[in-house]
Structure formats: structure tokens, C-alpha cells
């Protein structure tokens, strides 16, 4: 799990693209028009280190928004409420679970990582200092090393 939803959360900041996509009335417009600058601001808001957000990365995110169905899927997901989540179901998970979280995640607070770790009996937690909501993108080498360690059956240190 990487910076996952499942518990109530109050974000410190929400990407502008996410804010706009929450409004059903804007869906037809956003499905046709989404300025690249909105995408760039959204990417900057989920990275802890702005210097890692270059034009090629923004282009990749923007290109993904142009793929058929992606904008509609994002709008639909963001219009769903997290209040429908049932944290009690999380406690029923017993499979080995690796929980990865960026300590500087402003979208889903790092405190939620501790909730998942507490409630999933067979879980391991790794919090990455200096990383935001997408730690696997900001520092793929470090996050992959932790995943490999977990898959090898070795304990992961917080």
C-alpha cells in the first residue's frame, strides 16, 4: 500500500486538479479541457521535493490525462466520498502487507500510515523522510529496495 485511502483524513493540501474534479458540474468541461499548468501544479503538490518535478515529468502526467477514459475515471473517483470507507474491514486483513508512506504527504496524512499498520495484523510499515504522496516516483531506487526486502521475507525497518 502506498499512501492509501481508507481512514478519514484531512489533507494539508489538495492538488488543484483534484479539487476541480470533485465537482460533477465541471466533469464535461474537464473531460475536454485540462490546462497543462493545472497538471503541473497538481504534480508539484504531491511531490515533497519540487526540484524533482521537471518538464518531462509534467509532460508524462499531462499525456496520461489525454488517454481515453483517464479524466473520466479520475473525476469519478474523486467524486466518491471517503466517508463510505469502513475502517473496520481493514482490521480483517491478515495477508502480509507492506505499507509505504511519504513523511511529507500533504494529501493523506502520515498518521494514517500508523492506523493501517495498527489495524493490519501482518503488516510492515516504512515511512520515507523527505518524500511526499508518491514516494515510489520521487525515489524509486529506495522504495524498490524496501519492496524487494519485504518480498524476500526480511523485516522492513521504519
Image (spheres, rainbow, N blue to C red):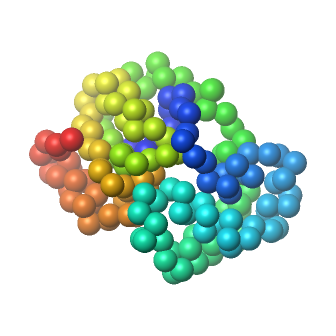
Residue shown at 28%/25% (left/top)?
Answer: 121
Question: Is residue 76 visible in the rendered structure shown here?
Answer: no
Vertical position of residue 60 compared to residue 156: above or below:
below
In which quadrant will I find the C terminus? top left
Residue shown at 28%/58% (left/top)?
Answer: 143
Q: Where is residue 97 shown, x and y percent of the image?
A: 30, 38
State left or right for residue 129 relative to residue 154: right
The image quarter containing residue 120 is top left
Residue sitting nearer the eye, 40 or 86: 40
Residue shown at 40%/48% (left/top)?
Answer: 104
In which quadrant will I find the N terminus? top left
Q: Where is residue 30 shown, x and y percent of the image?
A: 79, 61
State left or right for residue 42 relative to residue 108: right
Q: Where is residue 101 shown, x and y percent of the image?
A: 36, 46
Question: Is residue 157 visible in the rendered structure shown here?
Answer: yes
Residue shown at 41%/63% (left/top)?
Answer: 49
Amino acid at each position: 500500500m502506498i499512501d492509501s485511502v481508507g481512514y478519514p483524513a484531512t489533507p494539508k493540501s489538495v492538488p488543484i486538479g483534484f479539487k476541480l474534479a470533485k465537482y460533477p458540474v465541471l466533469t464535461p468541461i474537464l473531460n475536454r479541457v485540462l490546462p497543462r499548468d493545472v497538471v503541473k501544479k497538481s504534480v508539484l503538490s504531491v511531490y515533497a521535493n519540487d526540484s524533482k518535478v521537471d518538464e518531462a515529468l509534467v509532460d508524462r502526467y499531462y499525456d496520461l490525462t489525454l488517454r481515453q477514459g483517464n479524466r473520466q475515471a479520475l473525476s469519478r473517483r474523486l467524486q466518491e466520498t471517503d466517508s463510505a470507507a469502513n475502517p473496520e474491514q481493514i482490521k480483517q486483513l491478515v495477508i502480509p502487507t507492506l505499507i509505504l508512506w511519504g513523511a511529507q504527504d500533504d494529501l493523506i496524512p502520515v498518521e494514517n500510515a500508523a492506523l493501517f499498520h495498527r489495524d493490519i495484523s501482518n503488516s510492515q510499515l516504512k515511512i520515507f523522510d523527505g518524500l511526499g504522496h508518491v514516494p515510489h516516483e520521487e525515489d524509486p531506487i529506495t522504495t524498490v529496495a524496501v519492496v524487494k526486502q519485504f518480498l524476500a521475507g526480511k523485516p522492513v525497518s521504519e
